[in-house]
Image (cartoon, grey):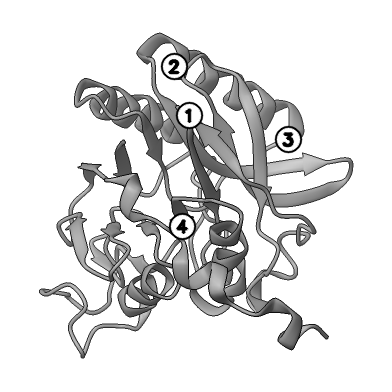
């Protein structure tokens, strides 16, 4: 399966986020990717950690999703689009999954919020498995994928060949200048990606913004912990990777003895 990870710049507005999404979806489709994933809360942009994101109504967000569905259908590519989403009066941090025909297949909400996000979103309560072109996958969002490995194991035990991990780490104003993927002096994020893949024997795809000073690269990590590809630090763009899903056996995840750790 050919997968694409999109690392766009931080959007200036909802309109700009939709422009960047369409641009990078078309880029991924031109490289024959079957699915493309964007970073956390990209529509309209991550609202915490000092970032300024446009506050949008439920109607604006619904209209934005409809636009993305149209782009997916026009370019024959599935997309995982992280965005704000209202359920009643509750604002959730979700990743919508859209098929290559423009059908919304559902969404995964961020269930484990970072403590700093408690005043921004309401935590989700369920997990889901998705399927595109016969390949099952899961989604875990930022903090929960980095610090709650159970969110990834849950998907792997249910047949996911890959877990996509939209997140937001870094800044355009200041921060470490990373040179080597997974270096011992890098922030821990890339090492966590490696572990999520190895401990479950599946592929893991971390997807970050195209920050000037990222604390992690958008990366595809193989079932054995090998980094297959990553986005160049400090640059926006798309990477496309052909993964061999037969190697994603989920062996270690399936050997986990859940009954010993029940609360």
Quarter in which the C terminus is drawn: bottom right
**Residue, disc 4:** 165
Q: Position of residue 187 (x, y in %)?
A: 31, 83
Q: Please tell me how crowded label 1 is: few (under 14), some (14-19), or many (20+) other residues with Cα within 10 Å.
A: some
The earlier-in-sequence mark between 4 and 1 is 1
Residue at the spot x=54%, y=35% of the render? 131
Q: Residue lying farthest right?
A: 88
Query: Which type of secondary structure does the marked residue at label 1 adopt?
Result: helix
Which numbered circle lies on residue 15? 1
**Residue, disc 3:** 57
Query: Which type of secondary structure does the marked residue at label 3 adopt?
Result: loop
Q: In the rendered structure, are the residues bearing label 1 and label 2 in contact, judged by CB atoms less than 8 Å apart?
A: no
Which numbered circle lies on residue 71? 2
Mark 3 → mark 4, Cα distance in angstroms:
25 Å
Mark 1 → mark 2, Cα distance in angstroms:
14 Å
Quarter in which the N terminus is drawn: top left
Mark 4 → mark 2, Cα distance in angstroms:
22 Å
The earlier-in-sequence mark between 1 and 2 is 1
The earlier-in-sequence mark between 3 and 4 is 3
Frontmost of labels 4 and 2 is: 4
Q: Please tell me how crowded label 2 is: few (under 14), some (14-19), or many (20+) other residues with Cα within 10 Å.
A: many
The earlier-in-sequence mark between 3 and 2 is 3
234 relative position to 100: left or right = left
Q: Position of residue 78 (x, y in %)?
A: 45, 27
């Amino acid at each position: 399966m050919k997968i694409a990870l999109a690392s766009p710049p931080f959007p200036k507005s909802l309109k700009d986020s939709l422009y960047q999404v369409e641009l990078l979806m078309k880029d991924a489709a031109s490289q024959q990717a079957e699915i493309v994933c964007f970073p956390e809360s990209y529509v309209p942009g991550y609202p915490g950690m000092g970032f300024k994101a446009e506050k949008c109504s439920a109607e604006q967000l619904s209209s934005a999703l409809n636009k993305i569905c149209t782009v997916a259908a026009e370019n024959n590519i599935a997309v995982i689009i992280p965005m704000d989403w209202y359920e009643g009066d509750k604002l959730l941090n979700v990743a919508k999954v859209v098929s290559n025909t423009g059908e919304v297949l559902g969404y995964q909400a961020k269930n484990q919020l970072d403590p700093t996000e408690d005043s921004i979103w309401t935590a989700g309560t369920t997990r889901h498995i998705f399927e595109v072109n016969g390949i099952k996958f899961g989604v875990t969002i930022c903090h929960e994928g980095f610090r709650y490995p159970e969110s990834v194991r849950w998907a792997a035990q249910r047949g996911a060949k890959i877990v996509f991990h939209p997140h937001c780490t870094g800044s355009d104003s200041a921060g470490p200048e990373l040179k080597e993927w997974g270096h011992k002096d890098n922030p821990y994020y890339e090492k966590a990606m490696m572990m999520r893949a190895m401990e479950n024997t599946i592929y893991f795809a971390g997807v970050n913004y195209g920050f000037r000073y990222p604390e992690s690269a958008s990366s595809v990590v193989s079932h054995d912990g090998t980094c297959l590809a990553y986005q160049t630090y400090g640059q926006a763009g798309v990477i496309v990777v052909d993964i061999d899903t037969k190697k994603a056996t989920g062996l270690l995840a399936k050997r986990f003895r859940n009954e010993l750790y029940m609360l």
